[in-house]
Image (tube, rainbow, N blue to C red):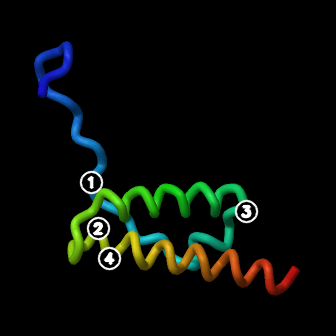
């Protein structure tokens, strides 16, 4: 499928970067929820067994763990 400029549609970023617990410490609750949404959508669009799929799953787990930790200390 081609866009107006005849170069074709831009490829959406395919790779899901692993989000570590270290990165999550500096995020606020709204940012964590936003990242969780992004990671979930990346997971839904990825093929099972790929690095993108594994990174999305691990990122979701890390985000959920960070949210749970913050709830337990507040």
C-alpha gap between disc 3 and disc 1: 26 Å
Q: Position of residue 27 (x, y in %)?
A: 67, 63
Q: Residue furthest right?
A: 74
Mark earlier in primary sequence (2, 1): 1
Mark 1 residue element? loop
Q: Alpha-carbon neighbours of circle 2 within 10 Å: few (<14), some, or many (≥20)?
A: many
Q: Mark 1 — residue? A: 14
Q: Mark 4 — residue? A: 54
- Residue shown at 11% from the left, 17% from the top: 6
C-alpha gap between disc 4 and disc 3: 24 Å
Q: Mark 3 — residue? A: 29
Verify CB contact (< 8 Å) between mark 4 and mark 2. yes
Q: Position of residue 65 (x, y in %)?
A: 62, 82
Check residue 52 in the rendering and tell me which mark sits there, or answer none: 2
The image quadrant where one finds the N terminus is top left
Q: Position of residue 19 (x, y in %)?
A: 48, 70
C-alpha gap between disc 2 and disc 3: 24 Å
The mark tally for this picture is: 4
- Residue shown at 32% from the left, 76% from the top: 54
Mark 4 residue element? helix
Q: Alpha-carbon neighbours of circle 4 within 10 Å: few (<14), some, or many (≥20)?
A: some
Q: Alpha-carbon neighbours of circle 1 within 10 Å: few (<14), some, or many (≥20)?
A: few
Mark earlier in primary sequence (2, 3): 3
Q: Position of residue 72 (x, y in %)?
A: 80, 86
C-alpha gap between disc 2 and disc 1: 8 Å
C-alpha gap between disc 4 and disc 1: 13 Å
Verify CB contact (< 8 Å) between mark 3 and mark 1. no
């Amino acid at each position: 499928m081609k866009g107006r400029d005849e170069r074709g549609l831009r490829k959406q970023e395919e790779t899901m970067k692993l989000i570590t617990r270290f990165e999550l410490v500096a995020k606020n609750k709204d940012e964590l929820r936003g990242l969780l949404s992004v990671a979930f959508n990346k997971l839904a669009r990825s093929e099972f067994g790929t690095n993108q799929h594994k990174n999305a799953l691990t990122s979701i787990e890390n985000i959920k763990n960070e949210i749970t930790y913050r709830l337990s200390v507040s």
